[in-house]
Image: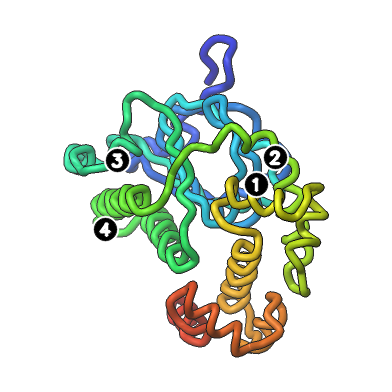
Amino acid sequence: MNTGGGPPSLDPGDFFPEDGIPVTVMDAEHHGRVWLHSHEFYEIVYIERGFSLHSYENTTAILSAGDLFIIRPGEVHAYTAAHHTKLMNLLFLPEALGPLIDELRALPGASVIFSEEGGRFGRVRLDLSERPGVEEALRRIRAEELGHRAGAKLNLRLLLAGFLVALIRFARDHDIGAPGPEERTYLPNIRRALRHIEEHYARHLPVREIAQASGLLPDYFARRFRDILGAPPAEYLKNYRLAEAMDMLAETDLSVAQVAEGSGFPDPANFSRQFRLCVGMSPTEFKQRQLIKL
């Protein structure tokens, strides 16, 4: 539905069943633009892969894999220049929480979700070790929603409350500052750098080459990249490679050595060390856990 001449407001009835608890998890892929809109439900967005410019309440930021943020009811937002952006959306109305909502609102830091003043939540940039847990929690909510088993409404309420507690903790533990005034100026340069990383991560890729692709001088590029994405280019590249490796380990039968080579780590021993440092377990342990889930 649309009120007045502003951006359209999405109808909750298009997303939640009439006789069920108003919470749902949706997969989405964005390419190009998703126009300005708002809605009267809460939306928690988790970026699985890709990157996109995101306009939110008159600010623009760049989103990349591992970003987690919330859109409150009535807040206007849009995705612009999305590049193969895969995301998971958790949508809910406050009544989905039932009596638990009062306890959640009373938690320290709960204003990042339930603030009545609106304003920018900011991005939580999840560590590699945190991302599998978030993805698994969202999948559990979706499975419960679709399963229609005994106690589904109760369990959905509990799973939703647990996810919101985790979100409040993430917001406490991570820097969630709003983008600075320079971010918008250099977004085109950083987008070009991210696209170059995505296309060439599997080979030797010096930071100087990424800077050249961005159109900025190397030292200046490194500063702007860190300001906008919260990590130096070399660290971002390493994390990008490890995230790709996690997908390969979970979704293919490739050996650890083959995954290392395919994700840009020519030395399998170094790959295993970096993987353990960032993910908290060895590549073999990670792959075994994915097989158990199947």
Residue 293: name its quadrant: bottom left
Query: What is the spatial separation of the Cα atoms under label 3 and label 1, in whole angstroms?
Result: 41 Å
Residue furthest top as drawn: 4
Disc 3 versus disc 1: nearer the observer: 1
Q: Quick check: marks 4 and 1 in contact, CB under 8 Å?
A: no
The reply to whether dot 2 and dot 3 touch (C-beta < 8 Å) is no
Work out how far the residue at label 4 is from the one at label 1, CA to CA, in angstroms. Answer: 52 Å
In this view of the protein, can residue 195 be seen by the observer? Answer: no
Q: CA distance from mark 3 to mark 4?
A: 17 Å
How far across and how far down the image is residue 269, in percent? 60, 90
Horizontally, residue 222 falls left or right of residue 19, namely: right
Q: Residue at x 76, y 69 (%)?
A: 205
SS state under label 3: helix
Determine which quarter of the picture holds residue 134: bottom left
Nearer to the camera, 163 or 20: 163
Return the residue at label 4. 150
Q: In this view of the protein, which residue sits in the foreground, 42 or 197?
A: 197
Return the disc, 3 or 1, that comes first in the chain's sequence: 3
The residue that disc 1 covers is 224
Q: Residues within 10 Å of mark 3 (few under 14, many from 20)?
A: many
Q: What's the distance in space between the residues labelled 2 and 3, CA to CA?
A: 40 Å
Tell me the number on the disc at residue 186: 2
Where is residue 136? Give x, y as percent.
Answer: 43, 64
Q: Amino acid at mark 1?
A: Arg
Q: Is residue 15 left or right of residue 169?
A: right
